[in-house]
């Protein structure tokens, strides 16, 4: 076999193994997303996080963002109900967000003294 054919065969086998392992890893019983849906959800998550980072009233370290089919779930804790409301408001402004599930907990000990 020539060196080029060996490289092509290795690349094909590597790609096949990657696709197979990804398919098995994704079989978690949840509804499947297409690559386009996953990509757009990742973009929505990134944009929501950017909005939170850009807001001085919120701490991006305290708020986790997850997106599934345009539905954004916020988890973590904030110091006040107003911060929780602000996180929801900001999230709704992001293009691609179809719904916001605010699971943020209010923890007054998070307030800056």
Image (cartoon, rainbow, N blue to C red):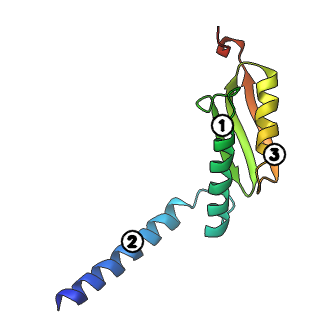
Q: Is residue 112 above or below residue 20?
A: above
Q: Estimate how packed mark 2 is, as few (under 14), some (14 to 19) or many (20 or more) residues with alpha carbons within 10 Å.
A: few
Q: Position of residue 48 (x, y in %)?
A: 69, 45
The numbered disc on residue 54 is 1
- How many marks the image carries: the answer is 3
Q: Position of residue 78 (x, y in %)?
A: 70, 23
Task: Give the distance between the C-alpha atoms of the residues marked 3 and 1, in whole angstroms.
Answer: 15 Å
In terms of secondary structure, where does tag 1 sit? Answer: loop
Indicate which disc, 1 or 2, sits on the residue closer to the N terminus.
2
Task: Give the distance between the C-alpha atoms of the residues marked 1 and 2, in whole angstroms.
Answer: 40 Å
Q: Estimate how packed mark 1 is, as few (under 14), some (14 to 19) or many (20 or more) residues with alpha carbons within 10 Å.
A: few
Name the front one of labels 3 and 2: 3
Q: Which residue is mark 3?
A: 92
Say which quarter of the image contains residue 50.
Answer: top right
Say which quarter of the image contains residue 32.
Answer: bottom right
Q: Position of residue 83 (x, y in %)?
A: 76, 26
> In front here: 96 or 34?
96
Name the front one of labels 3 and 1: 1
In terms of secondary structure, where does tag 2 sit? Answer: helix
Check whether the beta carbons of the residues at disc 1 and disc 2 lie within 8 A of each other: no
Q: Is residue 77 above or below residue 75?
A: above
**Residue at left 66%, top 11%?**
109
Any part of residue 34 in sight:
no
Q: Residue furthest top?
A: 113
> In front here: 46 or 19?
46
In terms of secondary structure, where does tag 3 sit? Answer: helix
Answer left or right for 50 relative to 24.
Answer: right
Q: Estimate how packed mark 3 is, as few (under 14), some (14 to 19) or many (20 or more) residues with alpha carbons within 10 Å.
A: some
Q: Which residue is mark 2?
A: 17
């Amino acid at each position: 076999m020539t060196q080029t054919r060996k490289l092509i065969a290795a690349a094909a086998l590597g790609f096949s193994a990657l696709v197979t392992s990804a398919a098995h890893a994704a079989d978690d019983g949840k509804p499947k997303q297409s690559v386009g849906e996953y990509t757009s959800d990742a973009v929505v998550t990134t944009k929501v996080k950017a909005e939170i980072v850009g807001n001085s009233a919120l701490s991006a370290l305290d708020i986790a963002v997850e997106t599934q089919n345009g539905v954004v779930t916020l988890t973590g804790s904030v110091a006040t109900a107003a911060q929780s409301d602000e996180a929801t408001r900001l999230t709704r402004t992001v293009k691609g967000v179809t719904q916001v599930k605010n699971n943020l907990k209010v923890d007054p000990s998070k307030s800056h003294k």
